[in-house]
């Protein structure tokens, strides 16, 4: 339920897809968009979950998949002429980041 449209988040997510975690964090750190700040926190959380829950090494992780789906919009109204009301949709999104460990044999075939 991030208070941002999914299309704005997708622009930043496309920058980090298929990158290793360190490189993705550097990209997010220097990206000048509000979505980058939120996605950087999410990436750090995904890495922490992989290290603590699945006992993976943080240096071997890469962003396997990342996507933003639309969430429920917050419906607000703005006054218009002649007593009418115009609807304003304040959009939300659900952001998902999947990290995976790079095996030594698979890393030879991957290009960054």
Image: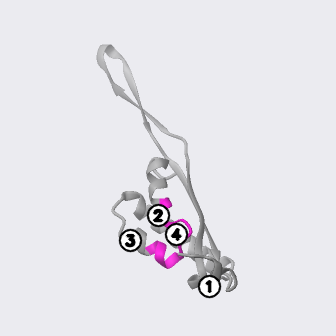
Q: Which percent across, then down, holds residue 88?
A: 40, 33
Distance CA(mark 2)–CA(mark 4): 13 Å
Distance CA(mark 2)–CA(mark 1): 23 Å
Identify the residue position indicated by label 4 in the image: 43
Label 2 vs 1, first from the N-terminus: 2
Question: In the figure, 6 relative to 85: above or below?
Answer: below
Could you tell me if the residues under marks 2 and 1 are in contact, i.e. CB atoms within 8 Å?
Answer: no
Identify the residue position indicated by label 2 in the image: 15
Identify the residue position indicated by label 3 in the image: 29
- In the image, residue 3 lies in the stretch drawn in magenta: no
Residue range highlighted in magenta: 13-25
Distance CA(mark 3)–CA(mark 4): 11 Å
Label 1, secondary structure: give it: loop
Identify the residue shown where x is 67% and y is 77%: 53
Distance CA(mark 2)–CA(mark 3): 12 Å
Q: Which percent across, then down, holds residue 80?
A: 32, 21
Dot 2: within a 10 Å radius of its alpha carbon, few (fewer than 14), some, or many (20 or more) residues?
some
Q: Which mark is residue 57?
A: 1
Label 3 vs 4, first from the N-terminus: 3
Label 4 vs 1, first from the N-terminus: 4
Could you tell me if the residues under marks 3 and 4 are in contact, i.e. CB atoms within 8 Å?
Answer: no
Dot 3: within a 10 Å radius of its alpha carbon, few (fewer than 14), some, or many (20 or more) residues?
some
- In the image, residue 20 lies in the stretch drawn in magenta: yes
């Amino acid at each position: 339920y991030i208070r941002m449209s999914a299309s704005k988040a997708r622009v930043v997510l496309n920058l980090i897809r298929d990158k290793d975690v360190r490189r993705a964090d550097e990209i997010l750190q220097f990206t000048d968009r509000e979505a980058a700040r939120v996605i950087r926190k999410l990436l750090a959380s995904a890495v922490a979950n992989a290290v603590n829950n699945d006992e993976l090494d943080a240096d071997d992780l890469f962003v396997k998949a990342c996507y933003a789906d639309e969430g429920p919009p917050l419906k607000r109204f703005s006054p218009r002429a002649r007593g009418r009301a115009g609807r304003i949709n304040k959009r939300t999104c659900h952001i998902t980041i999947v990290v995976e460990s790079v095996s030594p044999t698979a890393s030879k075939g991957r290009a960054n």
